[in-house]
Image: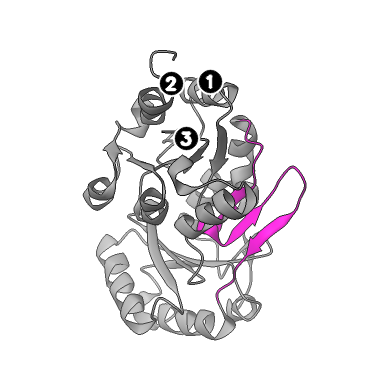
């Protein structure tokens, strides 16, 4: 194999509960970069929320944010791709999510121009703010944001059953040419443009920007929003903390994020005995 590009998810992959990249992972990443293998991040996070991790691992490539809705190069500030949920679909999503029976059971986050907008600051929003570093802007009506074509709508709920019900509902209501529906954690439902997924974004980075092929890519992720890029890559590695369905499609499963599973995977496939 001739792997020339390593693509990494952030949360649950290179960053665990501590919300930072541990030294064994940084050392492994630095070792592959020294060998000439380029390293990119592909995350569901906002662009500016992902930047500290981007700089921490010394990436020099465009950054894939919002599950692929945005591809932007921090080195040059050039935007390669920006895909928004169409206003009519975003408004339809809000119509459903803001029904009275959901008001106490979920939060909705809307993103426009790399800014987070919410209807109110709740406990879940505070938790999200603490982990992401985002500063939520409160607006009386999220429709004012949805009408601008949001990069992503995020549904947050501690009720995992409700998240699954919403996934089924939106997947049935909208076809794959209208909306991309996925999860980044058990409590995060991600709704994006139909072409905004990590698989297509990694393909764009690989083939259109870098002039490489899928056979030269290794990707590591931990959740459902990583499925497409794990399938695209020649080597798709799932974390030990990934759901069984994600582990099942991977070429290999490493250990848990808290045990530096990314470093183990890099050592196995890219470094041999050198790390």
State if disc 1 and disc 3 touch (CB < 8 Å). Answer: no
| 15 is higher (above) or lower (below) than 32 | below
Q: Secondary structure at mark 2?
A: helix
User: x and y percent of residue 40 in the render?
Assistant: 56, 41
Which span is picked out in magenta? Answer: 58-85
Residue drawn where x is 57% and y is 80% of the image:
86
If the image is split into quadrants, where does the N terminus sit? top left
Q: Which sits earlier in the primary sequence, circle 3 or circle 1?
A: 3
Q: Is residue 178 above or below residue 81?
A: below
Question: Taking 222 as reference, is 201 left or right?
Answer: right
Verify CB contact (< 8 Å) between mark 2 and mark 1: yes
Give coordinates of residue 76: x percent, y percent: 77, 46
Q: Does the magenta portion include 39?
A: no
| Rendering quarter of residue 257 | top left
Determine which residue is flagged by label 3.
3
Q: Quadrant of the C terminus?
A: top left
Is residue 101 or residue 37 the one in the foreground? 37
157 lies above or below 87: above
The residue where tag 2 is placed is: 271
Badge 3 density bin: few <14, some 14–19, many ≥20, Cα 10 Å: many
* Disc number for residue 243: none
Residue ID for mark 1 = 31
| Of the image marks 2 and 1, the number of the one nearer the N terminus | 1
Q: Nearer the viewer, mark 3 or mark 1?
A: 3
Q: Position of residue 198 (x, y in %)?
A: 47, 55
In front: 216, or 11? Answer: 216
Residue lying at the far right of the rendered structure: 76
Q: CA distance from mark 3 to mark 1?
A: 14 Å
- Callout in the foreground (3, 2): 3
């Amino acid at each position: 194999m001739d792997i020339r590009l390593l693509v990494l998810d952030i949360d649950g992959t290179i960053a665990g509960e501590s919300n930072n990249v541990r030294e064994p992972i940084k050392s492994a990443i630095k070792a592959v970069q020294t060998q000439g293998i380029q390293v990119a991040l592909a995350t569901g996070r906002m662009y500016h929320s992902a930047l500290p991790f981007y700089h921490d691992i010394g990436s020099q490539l465009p950054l894939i944010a919002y599950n692929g809705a945005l591809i932007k190069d921090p080195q040059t500030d050039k935007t390669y791709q920006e895909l928004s949920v169409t206003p009519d679909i975003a408004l339809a999503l809000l119509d459903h999510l803001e029904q009275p029976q959901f008001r106490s059971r979920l939060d909705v986050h809307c993103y426009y121009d790399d800014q987070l907008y919410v209807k109110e600051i709740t406990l879940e929003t505070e938790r999200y703010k603490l982990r992401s570093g985002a500063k939520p802007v409160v607006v009386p009506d999220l429709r004012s944001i949805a009408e601008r074509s949001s990069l992503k709508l995020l549904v947050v709920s501690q009720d995992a059953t409700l998240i699954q019900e919403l996934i089924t509902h939106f997947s049935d209501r909208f076809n794959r040419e209208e909306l991309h529906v996925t999860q980044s954690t058990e409590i995060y439902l991600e709704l994006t443009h139909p072409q905004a997924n990590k698989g297509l974004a990694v393909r764009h980075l690989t083939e259109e920007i870098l002039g490489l092929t899928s056979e030269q890519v290794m990707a590591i992720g931990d959740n459902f929003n990583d499925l497409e890029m794990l399938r695209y890559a020649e080597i798709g590695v799932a974390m030990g903390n990934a759901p069984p369905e994600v582990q099942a499609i991977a070429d290999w499963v490493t250990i848990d994020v808290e045990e530096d599973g990314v470093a183990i995977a890099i050592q196995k496939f890219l470094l041999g005995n050198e790390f």
